[in-house]
Image: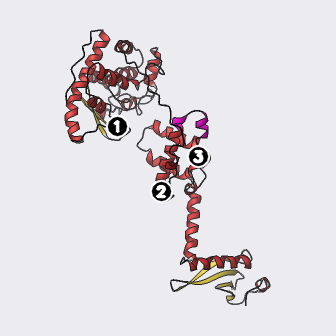
Amino acid sequence: MALTDTQLRNAKPESKDYTITDGLGLSILISSKGGKWWRFRYRYLGKPKLMSMGTYPEVTLQQARARRDEARALVAKDIDPGQDRKEQKQKAILEATNTFEAVGNEWHVLHNKNKSETHQQRVKRWLEFYLYPTLGSKAISSITAPMVLETTNILQKQGKLETAHRVIQTAGQVFRYAIQKGFAKYNPTPDLRGALPPPVVKNMAAILEPKDFAGLLRSIDGYRGTLTVRCALKLAPLLFQRIGELRHMKWVDLDFERNEWRYKVTKTKTEHIVPLSTQAVDIIKQMQSYSGHGQFVFPGGRTHERPMSENAINGALRNLGYDTRNEITGHGFRAVAQTLGEQELGFDPKHIERQLAHSVANPLGTAYERAQFLQARKVMMQKWADYLDELKSGAIVIALKQINE
């Protein structure tokens, strides 16, 4: 006979537990201590199973029957309802604990531990200012592409399209990490390809006329700032490297017997060899008595445990009267070297690209490239330094023959 609410209310505990059945596998256990527990008995793969469905009266007779019917439907589909409930519970816990912010913070610590402090702070701002306010509390597995796109609304209105692209790119990295850890199965950011207008690319300001660049070099020689900034500012035009890499130059990476600087490229994490001209070596050695006992060649003003400020070079250029928006920036020295090196001195573009730490397509492989290009680049860098000296002195600059491979 099917149970009634009256029977359930009147069922009293006895000296031993006993069971009253309702039918189709549903029953209620009357505990000797007074509790009333709903049970569902079923068979799965030929084995008897018992599944708890809550207590009465918290779970009413009608609700217990509905739960029983749901469980029977799963059995009919060859699904174990007991195991399915465990999986659903684990999924709920996973979603509650693995929010986008929780996963993002975990990813940020692991992903950025070997990155510069500046890069770490930049990525942290993208997470905290743009992604977390909208997505932070949501389960990472429940986030869709439109939700991610919504985080860039303010940036789009402000015209900061490059930052908007960076924010979505960062979100994509968090999703990929979540998939690797089993927190999510889907990365929605590839679906946003084309959803944002492309950013307007602005080239770094650079002085590309030899006579104008000669004036800049003479101004640099007359700079009266700190020793660290003076030397870094003089060295920057001699090298083809990024200012961030120059700032992080370490004594341990310098080989004065070979006149080489070896470091790992920030973007590609590959080893790069920079041949140093005699002029570059002389400038670097001026720093030995000041910072040679520490890690960085160009340390910060407050502590030698950190490199000089990322704004030091541009600040020095502004102090010399140059507009770092429209005339020259520290990064612009790379464009000057690339342009004048090829146009005025006839340097091989492959050697210039390699010196800039750009990848160079080479069917003979990296080993050949290192062996052949390094010697050519040593000659190139010395001729570049001599050319800059001639520019500063006002001597007539005669285009040199192209350095053959």
Label 2, residues with CA under 10 Å away: few <14, some 14-19, many ≥20:
some
- Spatial distance from mark 1 to mark 3, Cα to Cα? 31 Å
Report the span colored magenta: 150-163
Q: Earlier in the sequence, mark 1 or mark 3?
A: 3
Q: Is residue 193 above or below residue 80?
A: above
Residue found at x 49% / y 55%: 178
Q: Nearer the viewer, residue 311 or 353?
A: 353
Residue type marked 3: Tyr
For label 3, the residue is 132
Task: Let me know if residue 124 appears in the view.
Answer: no
On the image, the x and y values in percent for residue 180 come to: 45, 56
Q: Position of residue 374 (x, y in %)?
A: 22, 32
Q: Is disc 2 in contact with disc 1, using a CB cutoff of under 8 Å? A: no
Amino acid type for the residue under numbered disc 1: Val
For mark 1, what is the residue?
265
Task: Please tell me whether mark 1 sits on a helix, a strand or a loop.
Answer: loop
- Kindly identify the amino acid type of the residue bearing the numbered disc 2: Ile
For residue 195, which quarter of the picture?
A: top right
Provide residue 404's location: percent of width, then percent of height: 19, 27
In whole angstroms, how far apart are the C-alphas of marks 2 and 3?
19 Å
